[in-house]
Amino acid sequence: MPGQIKIDDGAGNYTILTNAGSLGSDKTITIPNTTGTMALTSDISAGGLSSAQQFRLTANVTSTGFLTANWEVPDTSIQGNLGSIVSEASGVFSFSETGYYLVHWDVGYQQSAANNTFGYVEIFLTNDNSTYTSSALGYWGGTSDYDLGFGSLSIIIDVTNTTNDKVKLHYTAQTGSSRISGSTTQNRTAVTFMKLGET
């Protein structure tokens, strides 16, 4: 027989009868007798991104190493973050929730001398809060003074442990004189974290 809904039994309970009419498979919805909000159950997905956050570099970087300083949350005009489950401390990006994340790093760079110059940037990952491994890499190069450029790296990560799974960003000035561009008013070099779903 088709499914049925049993009307309120007087205590605020509504029973949905299954097609088979089996009492063992029936479900009960309880509606509170006051003003309130009904939450979605664990088997119903609301969909959409639950978090999208950015951090930008506020000053130029000219030396090789992990980018451990001068990160800020963009605050120009109407810029903003959705959620706050990714945090940064001394260049280490941590997560307060497990899940699949897209990490997208946009990098503005510049040659600062007229010579053969190249450098590269990398996204490093760890799953033990100690040993970091380069997991994405991008190069640039040039021969003229003040050559400018822009590039990006992307990676999807599976955060299963919020204590041990972290991200760091690294810059290498390989030859010549070059720099990564930073700004307190523009996203010249910025990293974006988007939570795609649950792990």
Image (spheres, helix red, strand yellow):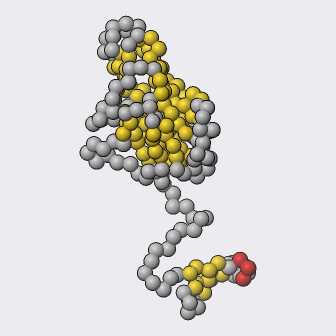
The quadrant where residue 186 appears: top left
Residue at image x 46%, y 45%?
87
Residue at image x 45%, y 36%?
90
Q: Look at the picture and state if 66 lies above or below 17.
A: above
100 or 17: nearer the eye?
A: 100
Residue 140 seen in the figure: no
Q: Look at the picture and state if 166 lies above or below 179.
A: below
Residue at image x 48%, y 31%?
169
**Which quarter of the rendered picture does the N terminus lie within?**
bottom right
In the rendered image, residue 95, in percent from the top left (x then y), is placed at 52, 46
The quadrant where residue 135 appears: top right
In the rendered image, residue 126, in percent from the top left (x then y), is placed at 59, 36
171 left or right of 181? Answer: right
Q: Look at the picture and state if 142 lies above or below 53.
A: above
In the rendered image, residue 41, in percent from the top left (x then y), is placed at 57, 68
131 left or right of 102? Answer: right
30 left or right of 149? Answer: right
Q: In the rendered picture of this protein, how many numbered marks are placed on residues? A: 0
Pick out the residue farthest to the bottom: 10
Residue 190 seen in the figure: yes
